[in-house]
Amino acid sequence: MFETLILEKRNHIGYVTLDRPKSMNAFNEQMGQELVNVFSEMEQDSDVRVSILTGSGEKAFCAGADLKDPRTHSLEVLAEFIETKHGNFFDAIAIYPKPVIAAVNGYAVGAGFQIALCCDVIYASDNARFILPQVSLGILPAYGGAVRLARFVGKGRAMEIVLSCKTVDAQEAYRIGVANQVVPLTDLIPTAERLAQKLAAMPPLSVRLAKESLNRGLDIPLVHATNADLYRFFALVGTQDRKEGHRVAKEMVLHHYDQQKKPQFKGR
């Protein structure tokens, strides 16, 4: 179904692997369209509650735009993008309502770094390298790449990384707030899976609205964010999952936590 991606679904987790190993998973137009399609498919699949996004192989998550493609960074492609929005893969990930964990294995360059920044949590292998080289190529990190980075690390650090095109290794990425955790390459997917499994076991609706609250709240004044959260809270109070979660919690309290019961959430 996909030529530049691999999609697997199991245990409520959608695994998306960027799969152009001969080019270190370099980004091209087809990958952009397939990212839009795959996240649309997972959004419509109620069995998928959380997603993990990674790259094939050990060297690269995504080596950036495929500079061997003559259409890359051309005016023709830009005009098509503005007219049709068919390649709006950044938003396809950023506004995806379910949690997305980026498992960055090796190089995340240019668009590859920006794809990771569209995810909710970033885990990095110890050989990960993050680079935004666009300014040195006479362009810039398009579609809000610099601003997305600033939301992770602050304006000053983002300005330095974007303007100098410096390479940020895994440990520095963790220190400045790009990566949530750095682990050996062999532990990368298992680490992402542990968080994914924990999130998949939680009430799907409250997870989605908590993510929405944080993402939308960053774009508006705090007073508006708090008011919007009241409506989200009221919506969740009426769900079956809220009743199930409270029921099990009350039983655990009554039994002094001797019985570790697991609630069964249905997403309703």
Image (cartoon, rainbow, N blue to C red):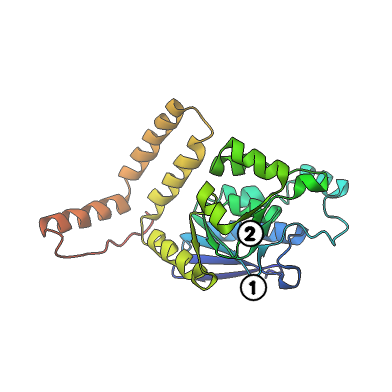
- How far apart are labels 1 and 2 at the CA level? 15 Å
Which residue matches tag 1?
57
1 and 2 marks in contact (CB < 8 Å):
no
Inspect the image, locate mark 1, and give the three-letter code of the amino acid beneath it.
Gly
- Specify whether residue 227 is in view: yes
SS at mark 2 in the image = strand
Q: Say the numbered circle drawn on residue 97.
A: none
Q: Looking at the image, can residue 141 be seen?
A: no
Q: Which amino acid type is shown beneath numbered disc 2?
A: Arg
Q: Is residue 208 left or right of residue 39?
A: left
Tell me: 160 left or right of 223.
Answer: right
* Residue 205: image location, x then y, percent: 40, 51
Q: x, y (%) of residue 149?
A: 60, 44
Q: Residue at x 55, y 67 (%)?
A: 15
Left or right of residue 268, residue 138 in this image: right
Q: In x, y percent, where is residue 55?
A: 63, 66
Residue 14 x %, y %: 52, 65
Q: Quadrant of the N terminus?
A: bottom right
Query: Observer-nearest residue: 133 or 19?
Result: 133
Quarter where residue 256 is shown: bottom left
